[in-house]
Image (cartoon, rainbow, N blue to C red):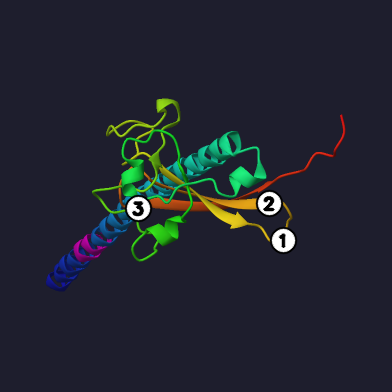
Amino acid sequence: MDANRSHGVRRSRGMVLITSLLLLVVVTLLALAMFHGVGLEYRIAGNNMDKQRSLQAAESAQEYGEQWLMANVPQDYGAAEVWGIPCAAANFTGATTPLMCSNTLESTLSGGNVGAVPWGGSSSNLGVSYNPGSALSTTAGSSTMIAQYPMVYLSRLGYDLGTPNSLDFMVDAWSYGGSASTVSVVESVYRVTYIASPPGP
């Protein structure tokens, strides 16, 4: 009778050992999955931050283009309707302020894809680089680091048929985020309306 009893105790000790080892494996797998999930959340947060950085830089360049347009648009409607030059990449070499182009960006690009950056290819750029007060940096590790400074391109679209004495202009801008794998492209149409002053003193 004692031999049967000791055999049953050994068998139950073996089952406890196997059960505890299985529980240890399950807990380890759960811990690994949790750590993997935390790492994934950090990558998602980093990607969102990079996306926001590129969008804010592109919108900043777009606003700069709009402000430049309003500060430099000719005061005379006749002069404004012919304002601009046919732009190509060579026009932007060494340019530090925007140019008014008589051709749209889409018509200037081969293939017409405004979403493919850099505009004009890797060897030449269409548009003017914008770094507001040297606030952005291309230095790795900087809190304001972007892969390349934002670019802005301005073009005259022509008459606005819906509003008399009005001309439409297009402002295109793009920017990378912290890496060249994140890019934002923005575009706006800006209307300038000329109001004739009444005759008199």
Q: Nearer the viewer, residue 78 or 29?
A: 78
| Observer able to see residue 82 | yes
* Residue underneath mark 3: 119
| Observer able to see residue 114 | no
Q: Are marks 1 and 2 in contact (CB under 8 Å)?
A: yes
Q: For mark 2, give the secondary structure.
A: strand
Q: Residue furthest right?
A: 200
Tell me the kind of residue under disc 1: Gly
* Residue underneath mark 1: 162
* Residue under the point 26% across and 56% down: 28
Q: Residues within 10 Å of mark 1 (few under 14, many from 20)?
A: few
Tell me the kind of residue under disc 3: Trp
* Residue underneath mark 2: 166
Please give the count of numbered marks on the rendered protein.
Answer: 3
- Magenta stretch bounds: 17-23
Q: Is residue 131 magenta?
A: no
Whole-percent x and y of residue 41? Answer: 38, 51
Q: For mark 3, give the secondary structure.
A: loop
Report which quarter residue 1 is drawn in.
bottom left
